[in-house]
Image (spheres, helix red, strand yellow):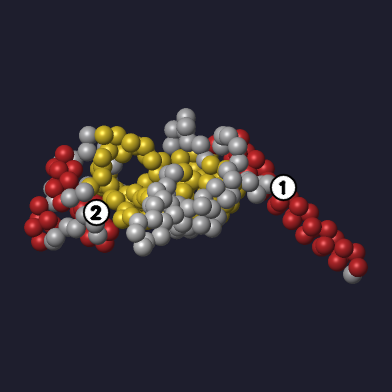
Amino acid sequence: MKSIVLTLVFFFFAVMVYSQEYSRTIHNRFALEITRGHALEADRYNRIDGSPYLNDEFVKGEVILNDSIRYVDIPMRYNVYSDKIEYKDARDQILEVNTRGVKSVEFKFDNHHFFLKRYKDGIQEFSGLLEVVEKGEISLFRKHNILLREREPAKGFQDALPPRFIPINSTYLLGIGDELPAKIHRRRDVLSLLEQGEVAADDYLRRNRVRVRSEESLVDLVSYLNKRLDSSE
């Protein structure tokens, strides 16, 4: 009996050590693959009110590189202000994910799913992290936004205000097929994108008021159009 207990203790200890080593190996491989530069200072935003993060806490998630290489249990958070994903390595250092030279990268954590994508805003093109809201032949993306307001000096009886991070409304983007997603600021942007993509939506738009600042309204539109496209195949 004693030998069985000792065997079980040894087995569970071995499994625990293996698990820790495996986790450390995954973190090390991830660090070599996609990080550059020095660790970030944990207190670098201490003199600024508010938070630049979607969520301050690190949450374990999944990173997919080039549609094939998958890393799991990576502690991550999204810095909206810098538009970068930060993660903790095996030594508890905070590092910034460097996406230069990466063909494609996805981040999945805490019910969020981000893609690094090129996108359009009017005639200009940008690259950044977009959160998937609805995926299909027509896709809807969300761009999170945070503004840094500089320190404001004292005026009259009003004390000086420190610099602060201020969350502002998310903007939404529509992507049709393989075309770059494009930001939509007004209803006519939606109409223009659908016309360019040769997507017929006149009947829906006649019956429904599409509000470009309402995620629910845009999800309803995209879901309807994707269902209709699926049924026509």
Say whether residue 115 is visible: no
Q: Give the CA separation, mark 2 to mark 1.
A: 45 Å
Dot 1, how many residues are within 10 Å of its Cα: few (below 14), some (14-19), or many (20+)? few
- The relative height of residue 129 versus residue 212 in the rendered view (above or below) is above
Dot placed on the residue nearer the N-terminal end, 2 or 1: 1
Q: In the rendered image, which quarter is residue 57 located in? A: bottom right
- Residue 11 is situated, as x and y percent measured from the top left of the image, at 80, 58
On the picture, is 205 further left or further right than 41? left
- Residue 10 is situated, as x and y percent measured from the top left of the image, at 83, 58
Question: In the current view of this chain or complex, which residue is farthest to the top?
Answer: 101
Quadrant of the frame with the N terminus: bottom right
* Nearer to me, 201 or 190: 190
Residue for point 58% across, 43% down = 40
Q: Looking at numbered disc 1 in the image, what kind of residue is underneath it?
A: Glu
* Nearer to me, 165 or 90: 165
- Residue 225 is situated, as x and y percent measured from the top left of the image, at 21, 53
Q: Looking at numbered disc 2 in the image, what kind of residue is underneath it?
A: Val
Residue corresponding to mark 1: 21
Residue for point 59% across, 49% down = 42
Label 1: which secondary element: helix
Residue for point 55% across, 36% down = 34
On the picture, is 1 further left or further right than 160? right
Residue corresponding to mark 2: 222
